[in-house]
Image (cartoon, rainbow, N blue to C red):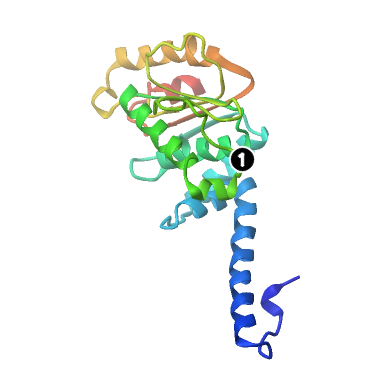
């Protein structure tokens, strides 16, 4: 039934007011239901100021496929300030935890401090009312205190680490590597070789059966992680 097509002009004023309130609630619920299965709809629900661009739609389509298991590997190469980290390291892991609260996620970036910062943002979003409206029943575990290492009430785990950091005992359904090299070290052959060695011997070996990998980075060198993985 389309509530917008119902003629309420002959109803009493108080009934019309109640009906319009129900219309708003109904519209919000439709958006929230769509946000459960569509990444870009989720973004619009939790980030009202978001301004959509064509590249956002392209990335969101890939994230939808990652969430359903249709896609297992994704590399996103974009210049700075194009929302790639907001999408890949903040909003996507939050959305995935809502859809699959048993997920194990490892988040890596060039410094542990930056990785923990992403963990804090994801943790805060999962603990918000906006998130609870979309994914009722999914919340943080009662002992989830550290921003870079926490769990959900369904057994999911999030672990933040700097590139080169130890991952002993950690498994991942989703591995996110976001800007593994800083601009200052982007032209250092030794640094770039060390990053790839860490990637192959550390996080890639921690992937669970059927797990997914996202590499998101600005490209500064033809010897970077993207180049080595593609090769």
Residue drawn at the location 41% of the way across and 41% of the way down: 86
- Name which residue lies at 66% across and 89% down: 9
Q: Is residue 216 above or below residue 198?
A: below
User: Which image quadrant: the N terminus?
Assistant: bottom right
> At 35% from the left edge and 17% from the top edge, which residue is drawn?
192
For residue 61, side relative to residue 176 (left or right): right
- Among the 4 quarters of the image, the one containing residue 207: top right
Whether residue 129 sits left or right of residue 79 in the image: it is right
Name the residue furthest left. Answer: 184
Camera-nearest residue between 202 and 43: 43
- Please identify the residue farthest to the bottom as the structure is shown: 10
216 horizontally vs 117: left or right:
right
Q: Position of residue 85 (x, y in %)?
A: 41, 38
- Mark 1: give few (<14), some (14-19) or many (20+) Cα within 10 Å: few
Viewer can see residue 78? yes
Q: Residue furthest right?
A: 1
- In what element is the residue under mark 1? loop
Report the label total.
Answer: 1
Q: Is residue 28 above or below residue 114?
A: below
Which residue matches tag 1?
A: 137
Out of 136 and 177, give the one closest to the viewer.
136
**On screen, residue 100 above or below 172:** below
Q: Position of residue 36 (x, y in %)?
A: 62, 47
Picture quadrant where residue 96 is located: top right
Tell me where residue 219 appears, x and y as whole percent.
37, 31
Q: Is residue 217 visible?
A: no
Viewer-proximal residue, 66 or 170? 170
């Amino acid at each position: 039934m389309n509530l917008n097509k119902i003629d309420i002009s002959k109803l009493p004023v108080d009934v019309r007011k109640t009906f319009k309130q129900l219309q708003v609630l109904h519209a919000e619920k439709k958006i929230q239901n769509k946000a459960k299965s569509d990444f870009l709809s989720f973004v619009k629900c939790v980030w009202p100021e978001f301004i959509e661009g064509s590249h956002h739609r392209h990335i969101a389509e890939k994230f939808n496929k990652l969430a359903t298991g249709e896609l297992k590997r994704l590399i996103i190469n974009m210049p700075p300030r194009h929302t790639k980290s907001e999408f890949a390291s903040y909003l996507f892991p939050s959305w995935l935890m809502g859809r699959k609260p048993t997920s194990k996620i490892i988040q890596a970036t060039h410094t542990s401090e930056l990785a923990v910062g992403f963990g804090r943002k994801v943790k805060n979003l999962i603990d918000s009312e906006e998130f609870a409206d979309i994914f009722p029943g999914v919340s943080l575990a009662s002992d989830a205190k550290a921003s870079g290492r926490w769990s959900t009430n369904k057994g999911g785990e999030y672990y933040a680490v700097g590139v080169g950091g130890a991952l002993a005992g950690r498994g991942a359904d989703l591995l996110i590597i976001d800007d593994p090299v800083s601009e200052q070290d982007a032209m250092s052959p030794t640094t770039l070789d060390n990053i790839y060695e860490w990637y192959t011997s550390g996080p890639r070996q921690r992937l669970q059966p059927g797990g997914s990998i996202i590499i998101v980075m600005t490209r500064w060198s033809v010897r970077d992680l993207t180049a080595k993985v593609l090769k």
